[in-house]
Image (tube, rainbow, N blue to C red):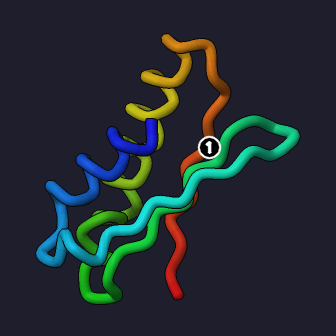
Amino acid sequence: MKELLTYIARSLVEHPEQVVVEQYDSPAGTVLELRVAPEDMGKVIGRQGRIAKEIRTLMRSAAQRQGIKLTVDIVDD
């Protein structure tokens, strides 16, 4: 799952080398934290959060096929 999110994010941004995905487990399931360069944040979130919503939907759907409960957090530092 981590590789899929990394691939999607790197396809969207201008600085793919700065894409970082961290994975950890929580009581609610697996959490993937996505970090990108500050100037690429808008490209990952999109207008009114549409791209971020679609990334989360796609990742949740892929995880569900594998029987995993997954959450995607987009983190800005």
Going 68% across and 51% down the picture, which residue do you hit? 24
Q: Quadrant of the N terminus?
A: top left
Q: Is residue 49 left or right of residue 64?
A: left
* Most distant residue in the right direction: 27
Q: Is residue 1 left or right of residue 26?
A: left
Q: Is residue 51 above or below residue 45?
A: above
Going 36% across and 65% down the picture, which residue do you hit? 45
Quadrant in the rendering for residue 4: top left
Q: Is residue 11 above or below residue 38?
A: above
Q: Which residue position holds label 1?
A: 71
Looking at the rendered structure, the secondary structure element under dot 1 is: strand
Q: Is residue 16 above or below residue 69?
A: below
Quadrant in the rendering for residue 35: bottom left
Q: Residue 43's x, y, as percent?
A: 24, 69
Name the amino acid, label 1.
Answer: Thr
Q: Is residue 37 left or right of residue 62?
A: left
Front residue of 49/17: it is 17
Going 43% across and 47% down the picture, which residue do you hit? 53
Q: Residue 19's x, y, as percent?
A: 32, 69
The number of numbered discs placed on residues in the rendered structure image is 1
Q: Residue 40's x, y, as percent?
A: 25, 78
Q: Residue 33's x, y, as percent?
A: 55, 60
How packed is label 1: few (under 14 Cα within 10 Å), some, or many (20 or more)? some
Going 50% across and 81% down the picture, which residue do you hit? 76
